[in-house]
Image (spheres, grey):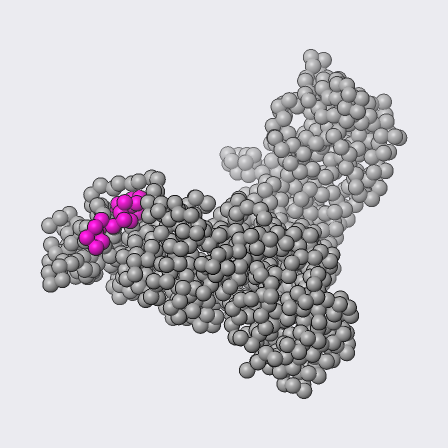
Amino acid sequence: MTGPSRDGETPKMKEEPKILGLLCRWCSYAGADLAGTSRFIYPPNVRIVQVPCSGRVDPVMIFKAFTEGYDGVLVSGCHPGDCHYGTGNCHARRKLAVARRLLETVGVDPDRMHFTWVSAAEGRKFAEVCAKFTERLKTLAGTEKTLARTGLAS
Amino acid sequence: MARVGVFVCHCGVNIAAKVDVAKVAEEVGKLPEVAFARDYKFMCSSPGQNLVKEAIKEHGLNRVVVAACSPKMHLPTFQKAIAAEGLNPYLISMANIREQCSWVTEDPEEATAKALDLVTRQVKRVAHQDPLEDIDVELNKTAIVVGGGIAGIQAALDIADGDRKVVLVEKSPSLGGKMAQLDETFPTLDCSQCILTPKMVEAAKHPNIEIRVNSEVATLDGYVGNFDVTIRRRATCVDEERCIGCGLCQEKCPVKNVPDEFNAGLANRPAIAIPFPQAVPAVPVIDRERCLKLTKDKCGACAKVCPADAIDYSDEGSEETVKAGAIVVATGYREMDPAVYTEYGGGTLPDVITGLQFERLVSSTGPTGGHLKRPSDGKEPKTVVFTQCVGSRDPSRGHEYCSGICCMYTAKHAMLYRHHVPDGKAYVSYIDIRSPGKSYEQFVRRAIEEEDVRYLRGRVGRIMRLKSGKYRVFTEDSLVGRPVAIDADMVVLASAVEPQAGAVELAQTLGIAYDADGFYSEAHPKLKPVETATAGVFLAGACQGPKDIPASVQQGSAAASKVLSLFARDTLKKSPQVAKVDPTACTGCLTCSYVCHYSAIEQSEFAGRQVAEVVAGKCQGCGACAATCKNKAIALAQFSDDEVFEEMLR
Amino acid sequence: MTELQQKAHELLESDAVDVVLGWRYEEPVDAVRPVLFKKGDDLSKLVFDNRSVHNLTNYLPTLVARYDKVGVVLKGCDGRSLVTLLVEHRLNRGSIVVLAPACDGVEVFGARAQKCDDCPTNVSPVADHQFGEKKTKDEAEYKQLERIEKMSPEKRWEFFAEQFAKCKRCYACRQVCPMCYCELCIADQQEPRWIETSVKPSANAMWNLTRAYHLAGRCSDCGECARACPEGLPLRALNLSIEKAVKEMFGVKPGTKPDELPPLVTLAENDPDSVMGGEL
């Protein structure tokens, strides 16, 4: 995929859109693994970064992802009530809801940020989420003034 | 300067069929951090692991990336391998190029490009990983079991047999719980007291178990391995050490009309009483609200007749603090009061009784000596209707959940009734029959097919008292589609299982979670049924959710096994994935402490100002605090901002 | 002397406070500025009028470290800042004495400040001595946001892209904000460098978005950041959009309750999933 890389030596990737996936270790990362074990095919655009809990996700990371050329950010955690750490997913929900509103205010399509619950048993759901999110971002591909992305990257 | 070794696994054809692993190794080798890179068929195999070890030696590697299956599969494998070579086991990371790449990507070119990207990210990340050491937490090897019913007794015995000390705290005057009130148990019709009392005695006599009856946990401080528990004993006015259990006091007590809790209100007891004949310990307790001496300074008969001089009216109760390493909560359940069902009499009809009350009527140690007699007139009931699901499966006025034990005990009650009154008619009004346990279905079928218990599928709509003293029960037989009215002498309501009174307050004292119904929350509904989110606090029995005796015993043993494995070593080894505050950067706003589910962040002081401090023993490593801190004064090891940044932004 | 001046004088004379932080008119510059009045000073020089724009809570942490008891004159908006500072343990309530005059609005660059049109309470919610009548507006109007909310997303982006391009990264907004008190601001951190120091639109956007997000549930809309910004960036709009979101989604208004926890750490279990946007 094309896009700014930070040190120049690393090869560039072809696919667009470029998606960052922040997945909680206990549910969503395991769900993504299950998608693999079940051989559910989905587009190669998502780059998964494991976090211990969706509550570890700081909206600053999301803003940074957008300013560094990601077209979309997917955050996935345990279903409410099932969080391995009790209530981390609920804190994430609140923080990300606020971040989403802020992005909306400055004119960045809030749908570029998708927050979902994927349990360790939901391999199919994870594959579907990746496929649908990739599709959505393809339709959101911007004009030249948004640098084909959020517009924050420049 | 990072010297990363990268090992790209073929995993046979699992990865290699889609990903050009040789190319990935070659490209990654060009990164400035990478000192060595190669591909190999099966990294997790012995030769595969040896490759890693040799490369560490030969190339002076100080970081390792294995690009293979999910870290959830083999990260510990490779951690052990590098540790064997003297490299800190936290200086490795894995790139998931199988489950999250080769197995889910159609096009080989795209799969290869994605794999290369994923490996590159891990190289950048691992270069920012720090060596970490597992944390040693000191450990006190005493367990507190809260609740002296069958689950608590089982847990206490198993822990004590494992050579560890137990303090068994029971609120009421005796061990035994609900099981002591039962007559015969399903599916064997074993005598409940007969199988329970040996265990009660064993617990009381066990050298490793200290019993504290009439006691409750007042406060709990500390963390796993290091709890400080305050146990408060109620004022009983009877000295346990001196009492010889002769029972003279309760004979002579002039107050005879206190509703007896053990007999579910069907009989009375004196103001000083041993709760039941087989009580362990068999020491009476003075009811402070009914005793004439304590309320009006009159009488004093018990003190006069006591041959052991065990009565002490000045007893105010007492408190003690115990240090413990683990807590098992086994506080059981209570039977719902069906008074809310006014259509069933709302508790005003004397012969409309609950399941527990029926148990007492049918028990030989009960108020009627085991003879089935109506509470109203003492006559033998010739027609009894047993109603299931009173308060269960009823979101409108009761509980949404199924209480799990009523189908079975109703079948039992109906059969016991038929044994006691062979010419009696027994009807069971049911919605469904839930009999999943071993021999449970056969037990219910026996009631229906051999013991002539008549099962009618339908809910009881109304119970009306007739002038004759009988009760007209309006129900239906939905399988034939007809309403049914039965004139019964007695109705038994299978009333729902509820959390104990004070369950929520106790949960708050212990710092454990509870669900919307008030039952205590397990750490994971499938995989951690006896642990709570609070490290070191375990659950057993009906306090976690309605369950029968075998399941309660299972959980008692399960909780005990958790405690014993916790106590197996002299120190607790904890993952180093914990948060830490840099006190020079911390502003002391304590915002992080509010998001911590484990109450692991405390207010502390540094250089004369308030700062936050993480209690490493309690921290479970979720990182919510790290996400909350605005200036990153608190960091989570293994998932620091640095590490996440590198992985995100290669 | 006015009642306010009289009370300030009394507090100093009786040693109830060591200093009173207020305003004084300075003739050479024809402006009022924040000053510390001490015992024996002429308190008829204590000014409180529509020129008293500064948010004096900014000085409180330093003053409280230096003096036992600090008196301070706070407007409604400043008082809301104080509430957040108290919730976040920046100050001990017992170290300050709040003089809370009813505020009629302040002037910025010769015109009534826009924030005053939106003012929910003209008297500090934390007050030891109140002067004048309290007026409360129940419904927030967010007038500042109206213009931006009416724009289409594309226009909004155009507008903010232009604005972020103007940002000089002077950090005046941060310096003047009482909520920006971090020991080492995230903007100054290098490992990792979440916010690049170079003045370019993406880094400027990072800075402004991050600061606005860090103010969620804390910003009292004192408007000082907007006043201090040399480029006139619409900072109040950014902050208000979050305040509005927090109020709508979680029912919380910052700066109203000193004994309540901040909204981003509380009551999270019952939030509806709808706050996260829709299905794919």
Residue B243 or C105: which is nearer the viewer? C105
Q: Position of residue C69 (x, y in %)?
A: 25, 59
Q: Position of residue B591 (x, y in %)?
A: 44, 58
Residue C125 or A102: which is nearer the viewer? A102
Q: Is residue C174 magenta?
A: no
Residue B242 or C156: which is nearer the viewer? C156
Residue at 62% across, 33% down: B395
Quadrant of the drawing holding the N terminus of chain A? bottom right
Range drawn in magenta:
C106-125
Q: Is B138 positioned to the left or the right of B629 in the image?
A: right
Q: Which residue sits furthest front? A: A144
Give the mark count: 0
Compared with C164, B53 (above or below) is below
Helix, strand or loop: magenta stretch: loop
Q: Which image quadrant for residue C58?
A: bottom left
Q: Is C53 positioned to the left or the right of B498 in the image?
A: left
Q: Which image quadrant for residue B422?
A: top right
Q: Which image quadrant for residue B584?
A: bottom left
Residue at 17% across, 58% down: C32
Residue B342 or B395: which is nearer the viewer? B395
Q: Position of residue C167 (x, y in %)?
A: 34, 63
Q: Is B628 positioned to the left or the right of C39 in the image?
A: right
Q: Which residue sits furthest top? A: B467
Quadrant of the drawing holding the C terminus of chain A? bottom left
Q: Is residue C116 magenta?
A: yes
Residue at 76% across, 35% down: B407
Q: Which residue sits furthest right? A: B450
Residue at 37% across, 59% down: C162
Whether residue A56 is visible: yes
Q: Position of residue A109 (x, y in %)?
A: 48, 52
Whether residue B137 is visible: no
